[in-house]
Structure formats: structure tokens, C-alpha cells
Image: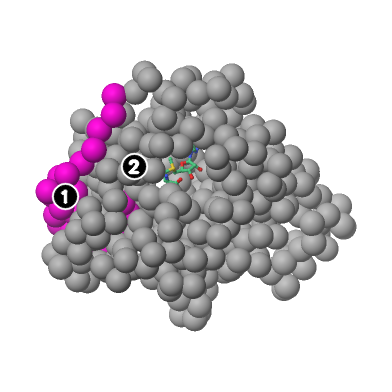
Amino acid sequence: MNTILKTSIDKLISHKLLCKEEFVALLNNNSKELRNELAHYAQIAKQKHFGNQIYIRGLIEFTNHCKNDCYYCGIRCSNRQLTRYRLTKENILSCCEEGYSLGFRTFVLQGGEDAYYDDEQMTNIVTSIRNHYPDCAITLSLGERSYESYQKLYNAGANRYLLRHETANSEHYQMLHPTTMTLSNRMDCLNNLKSIGYQVGCGFMVGSPFQTTEMIAEDLLFIQSFKPEMVGIGPYISHKDTPFHDQQNGTLEDTLLLISILRLMRPALLLPATTALGTIASNGREQGILAGANVIMPNLSPIDRREQYSLYDNKIGTGDEAAECIQSLRNHMQNIGHEIVVDRGDYSNLPK
Ligand code: SAM
């Protein structure tokens, strides 16, 4: 490895930040040697904060209706091939009941932007989960809503919110979304969530159409300044019924490199090995953990709905991805020296 890259790695470890050109150089020189080196230091950083513990989140994909028309996403409103569904509060509570008995202490409610779940519906659902499971964290991922709406949901008992910024470059944002959606609104939402007191997660797709390494460097600089508690990244995977159906997928290698960089930038970060990573490679999530991830989000949605939450082609929903197969996931994590814990797994800046 050349000395410039070595100096950048040392700087990343000691300063937890690089300038744009240094990030670009690392990303442009993604070799096995570089990935192994960064993964080694990322594991040390992770170990300091979390030991060998892996947090699990039970993912409940409660609606695939969406008013948005993001060009990359399979549940976009223009996709007429999809069978749409909504879960009732009772459906959602029974997912939580199953999850709780399997050892989940965080429930993630994720869905398209579905006006059916207005503030009244949504606060009613969150209040019920909060009353039934006072010891659990509730994470929401419902897209863009007003400040007042986020506040009501927080008051009802939600603790965390995932809203990927998708790209920190506004021109790129407009290549991925129709003009009804803007990066500035997305950023306003992220800032609002933070000021209300949520633990906030942002993130982006690796290898999304038209993305350059400079843009990824801008994402990293944004993450450094925003200081989220969580970051969700996964490879872009094309969906056959979207305008981007013939675009190339993101790669495992780029995603792994970025996981290690993020761990070194923010050692206490909650960083999932995502479903998309497990979709592009059969052991993708294990590789994500070994690169520095410390969260896995198995699917708790009703089995007969999983296929319909079709963000991209061949999305996994059974096997280790499924919450009901948690024992198998536990074994796989043990085989790579990690342990799944029954814990809310909140963000904590203090090394253990
Ligand atoms: N509506 C909420 C929102 O906008 O945040 C949550 C649901 S949205 C479908 C969740 C995430 O899925 C998006 O933030 C996006 O990054 C990811 N996603 C959508 N289509 C994808 C694709 N084709 N490949 C990989 N990830 C994708």
C-alpha cells in the first residue's frame, strides 16, 4: 500500500476525519489489502465500545403504500405491478409479541410514506407498543413528516428515527428523485428529528445510479458534521419495475470499505449490516460485521407480506434474515466471534 494511503489511515484512526480528497483517494483505491487493514482497526474501535456484542432490531415493514416516486425504489407509487398491503395495529402488536419472545428489545416500524397512517393512527400504534413493551426501544422509519408530527410520535413513546439522507449532493438527489422531493426538505427533517431528541439515523445507498466517489466523500463529510447516532448503508440493488431497472448494483466491496471507514469516523456508531448487504452476498451480513458493523435487523413482518415489501429484486426475507431463525443467526455470529444480546442497544458515547 502506498504511503499516502497509509498516512490517511493513520489520520482517520487518530483524528476520526479526513478531508474530501483523502476520502476520495481511499475510495478509489479499494483493494483487498486496504479493506483488511481498515477492517482490522474498525474491529478494534468497535471492540472498545461494544465488546463482541451485536444488537438486534426486529424490523416490521407495516405498509408498502407510498406516495413518493423515488426512481430506484420498488414500492414507488408508479409501480402498478405490486400488491399493496397495510398492517393493522393488532397485526403490528402480534409481530412485537413474537419478537419480544425471541429476544428483541427494539422494534423498527418501517413503511412507505402512507397518508393512511396519519398522526392519530400512528400515535395510537406507538402508544400501544409503548404501553405493552415499556422496556423496549421504538424506532420509526416513516419518511418525511412535519415537525409537529415527529414531536407527537416522540411524545407517544418513539425513541429513534431512521431517515436516510440518500445523498448529500443536491444535484445527485434530483437525479434519484422527482422534483417534488428535495434534499433541503430531507435535511430539515433530519435536523428537526435531532432537535426533538430522537436518536437519529441517516444513510445512503452505495453505488446508487450516477453516484461518484466525490459524492460518497460528501456523504461522509455530512455524516461527520451531522453526528448521527446510527448510519444505514447498503448496496443499491436494481428493481425490475423502476426506471433504474437496468442500472448496475452497488458492490459488496465498496459497502464493506465504507462500513470500516464509518466505524473509524464514529467509533460508538450504531451501524447495521443491512438486508441489502445480505442480499448481494450470501454471507454479506457476516462480512459486514467483520468490517465493523454491530447491528442486525431481522425481519419480523408477517411471512406472507415479506415478498410484497419489495424495495429491490431478490430481497431476502427468510433464512437467517428472518426473526424466527434467530438461533441460526446466533450460531453464525458465534462462529465469527460475536454474540447477539438481548438489549435495547441504545447509543452511548462512553467506551465500556
Ligand atoms: N419511507 C421511508 C423513507 O423514505 O425513509 C422508509 C422506507 S424506504 C423504502 C427505506 C430505504 O430503502 C430508503 O431510504 C432507501 O435507501 C432504501 N432503498 C430503496 N430502494 C432501494 C434499492 N433499490 N436498493 C437498495 N436500497 C433501497
- 272 left or right of 292 in image: left
Q: Residue at x 28, y 29 (%)?
A: 84
**Is residue 107 within the magenta segment?**
yes
Mark 2, other Cα within 10 Å: few <14 / some 14–19 / many ≥20: some
Q: Residue at x 83, y 54 (%)?
A: 21
> Residue 131 sits in which quadrant?
bottom left
**Residue 292 rendering spot, x and y as whole percentages:** 54, 57
- Rendered view: 181 above or below 289: above
- Rendered view: 162 above or below 166: below
Tell me how many marks there are.
2
**Is residue 188 within the magenta segment?**
no
**Residue 152 rendering spot, x and y as whole percentages:** 32, 66
Q: Which residues are magenta?
A: 83-109
Mark yes or no: residue 38 visible.
no
Q: Residue at x 61, y 54 (%)?
A: 184
Front residue (pair 336, 73) = 73
Q: Secondary structure at mark 2?
A: loop
Front residue (pair 327, 171) = 171
**Residue 232 rendering spot, x and y as whole percentages:** 50, 52
- Res. 65 mark: none
Q: Secondary structure at mark 1?
A: helix
Front residue (pair 31, 304) = 304
Please name the residue that numbered disc 1 is placed on.
89
Please name the residue that numbered disc 2 is placed on.
114
Q: Tell me if the residue at label 2 has its CB under 8 Å from ligand 1.
A: no
Residue type beneath disc 2: Asp
> Residue 206 sits in which quadrant?
top right
Residue type beneath disc 1: Lys
Gap between marks 1 and 2, in whole Å? Answer: 15 Å
- 346 left or right of 290 in image: left
Labels 1 and 2: the sequence-earlier one:
1
